[in-house]
Amino acid sequence: MSSTEGSSRAADKSPRQQVDRLLVGLRWRRLEEPLGFIKVLQWLFAIFAFGSCGSYSGETGATVRCNNEAKDVSSIIVLFGYPFRLNRVQYEMPLCDDDSTSKTMHLMGDFSAPAEFFVTLGIFSFFYTMAALVLYLRFHNLYTENKRFPLVDFCVTVSFTFFWLVAAAAWGKGLTDIKGATRPSSLTAAMSVCHGEEAVCSAGATPSMGLANISVLFGFINFFLWAGNCWFVFKETPWHGQGQDQGQGPSQESAAEQGAVEKQ
């Protein structure tokens, strides 16, 4: 019994010991440095960016009142959200005649490309910064001794900077078009029943776009974070050291020549 209990305790302790060793090996003070602190901000704001965009949902609507006494007031409520393929969103338009009751309509526009690109970039940024933090905190010796890691990190950082600028600008333009396509006045303008005299159409409440607007803001914040981090990553690369050596070289030579002249 004692041997079995001892083996079970050893088995229970081994995963705990592995976790403890992993946590002990992390150098948390690296987070106080600009390179580590900015990576944490990149990780957080990547979550905010793709989370606010990917979880957005809104609604628009209108009311149609037929002049016919047999018809009641019809309320139209249209739900839409990510990935903003509005041309696939259906709603029923009432008809003010006795032959048919309604007609299936669709919103106009497909804005899935900028929205999906924005969310995908946020997800890739999330995973890359998480992997970079593990490498920087746990395996910092590899990051400093192997010069390839800083070079790869610098190239990836520059690439993400460019992509965040493109994604934030494209998503901002797409969001502006979405606001125009989902405006209640655009909804009533697209319904043919509202153009005649047989019905009176009233626009509903304007969709709330607060969360979508914040996602665009997070996109530009990510751009500035990645752009600012380019300098700190560049300082870790051999290119930065070569520039300093070249700058110090002529000064040392001139000092040596001046000393030889003084001796003469």
Image: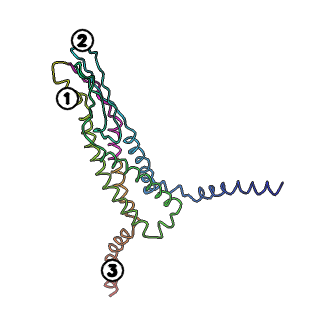
Q: Is residue 71 magenta?
A: no
Residue 260 locus on image (x, y percent): 33, 85
Residue lying farthest top? 69
Is tag 1's residue or tag 2's residue first in the polypeptide sequence?
A: 2
Residue type of the residue flagged with mark 2: Glu
Distance Cα–Cα, label 3 vs label 1? 78 Å
139, 69: nearer the viewer: 69
At 58% from the left edge and 59% from the top edge, which residue is drawn?
A: 25
Query: Are there few (<14), some (14-19), or many (20+) residues within 10 Å of tag 1?
Result: some
Look at 53% across and 55% down and name the residue there: 28
**Label 3: which secondary element:** helix
Number of numbered discs visible in the structure rendering? 3
Give the residue pinned by disc 2: 69
- For label 1, the residue is 189
Between circles 3 and 2, the one closer to the viewer is 2
The residue furthest right is 1
Which quadrant, please, contains the N terminus?
bottom right
User: Residue at point 38% right, 45% down?
Assistant: 49
Is disc 2 placed on a helix, strand or loop?
A: loop
Magenta stretch bounds: 199-219
As drawn, 106 above or below 121? above
Q: CA distance from mark 3 to mark 2?
A: 100 Å
Amino acid type of the residue tagged 3 in the rendering: Glu
Residues 81 and 53: in front is 81
Q: CA distance from mark 1 to mark 2?
A: 24 Å
x, y percentage for residue 226?
36, 54
Question: x, y percentage for residue 146?
Answer: 46, 70
The residue that mark 3 highlights is 253
| Residue at far front of view | 99
* Nearer the observer, 119 or 83: 83
